[in-house]
Amino acid sequence: MASKPQDRMVYQRDDGQWANKRNDADRASSLHHTQKHAIDAARGMLGNQGGGELIIKGVDQKIRAKDTIAPGKDPFPPAG
């Protein structure tokens, strides 16, 4: 499956912080002290933007896990 622009990646930066970044962005959306906090933030953002793929890299920068996130609940779903 090809990566989409809204998909997100969590990885550790050179300074030790964990980044949550959209695939089509130049900069990280958020930085975190732990991988868990970065993953939680990425899951929330993916749910809010309509779902997508979350790619999680380990400290060795190799893909550790992939997860498909479903769209979040729409408080005003379309009629019909």
Image (cartoon, rainbow, N blue to C red):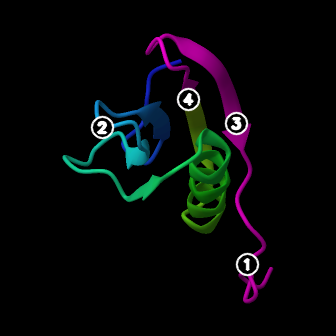
Real-space Cα separation, disc 2 to disc 4, in angstroms:
20 Å
Query: SS for tag 2?
Result: loop
Classify 10 Å Cα crowding around label 2: few (below 14), some (14-19), many (20 and above). few
Rendered location of residue 49, percent (x, y): 54, 64
For residue 64: magenta? yes
Classify 10 Å Cα crowding around label 4: few (below 14), some (14-19), many (20 and above). many
Give amino acid for label 3.
Thr
Residue marked by disc 1: 74
> Contact (CB < 8 A) between labels 3 and 4?
no
Depth-wise, is mark 2 or mark 4 nearer the camera? 2
Depth-wise, is mark 1 or mark 3 nearer the camera? 3
Real-space Cα separation, disc 3 to disc 4, in angstroms:
9 Å
Q: Can you say whether 62 is above or below 36 in the image? A: above
Residue under the point 67% across and 54% down: 40
Which circle's residue, 2 or 3, is located before the other in the chain?
Answer: 2
Which circle's residue, 3 or 4, is located before the other in the chain?
Answer: 4
Residue under the point 57% across and 28% down: 56
Query: SS for tag 3?
Result: strand
> Contact (CB < 8 A) between labels 2 and 3?
no
Residue 12 falls in which quadrant of the image? top left
Give 13 or 6, whichever is nearer the viewer. Answer: 13
Rendered location of residue 42, percent (x, y): 57, 52
Give amino acid for label 4.
Ile
What mark, if any, has residue 68 been given in the picture?
Answer: 3
Q: From which residue to which does the magenta span run?
A: 56-80
What mark, if any, has residue 15 been given in the picture?
Answer: 2
